[in-house]
Amino acid sequence: MEITLEQLLGARDDRYARQLSLTEAWPDRTLVCLTVVLPGSVKRDARSLKVAEAAVEAVREVLAPTYKELRDLETGYEGYFLVDAPLLDVKKACCEIENEHPYGRLMDLDVIERVGDTVVPVSRERVGEQPRRCLLCDRPARECMRAHTHTQEEIFQTIDRILGFDENP
């Protein structure tokens, strides 16, 4: 099912509100917010669910969260995890999952830091990691996203190959 820009922005606002609520309720824990990297207007399909299941399992195994909240929404899969470990240690572990897991490039594991009355994701650079690379080339992913360097068809072909959904392995 395709979603609208308004639905996407509303989901982002809801996610931010949930992050605020969880960091306020659990100031002594580190919050990890999971979303799936998927271009286009369809955010829930077999691809996103396969990545989400793998991400939840990886977070469970690596971080041993004390709290887990999963949301399977039309606007995309979301997971919220509270971890009893220092913020930067959790960020390093999340980067390791994103870097090493076979589907890691399709996972977005944001570690959320409370700063006053707001929340912000901890950058990869803060723990010595490079920005995420494009799925198709070696440039920073943000550059390719902004410039629309690759077609959606090219991106989905690569995603399908990563997930084993392609017809010609």
Image (cartoon, grey):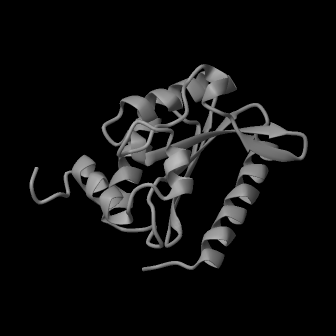
Tell me what residue is drawn at x 52 percent, y 78 percent.
Answer: 3
* Residue 15 location (% of width, % of height): 67, 59
The correct choice, above or below, for 110 with respect to 62 in the image is below
- Give the residue at x 46% y 38%: 139
Q: Do we see residue 85 in this rendering?
A: no
For image coordinates 45% across by 68% down, the residue present is: 40
Q: Residue 103: percent from the left, percent from the top?
A: 34, 43
120 versus 93 height, above or below: below
Number of numbered discs present?
0
Q: Quick one: 89 or 82, which is closer to the camera?
A: 89
In which quadrant will I find the N terminus?
Answer: bottom left
The furthest residue to the left: 168
Q: In the figure, 9 relative to 106: above or below?
A: below
| Residue 11 left/right relative to 158 | right
| Residue 137 in view in this figure | yes
Q: Quadrant of residue 123?
A: top right
Question: Percent position (x, y) of residue 66?
Answer: 58, 36
Residue located at (73% from left, 48% from top): 22
Q: Is residue 150 left or right of residue 148?
A: left
- Residue 159 drawn above or below residue 40: above
Residue 75 percent across, percent down from the top left: 53, 70
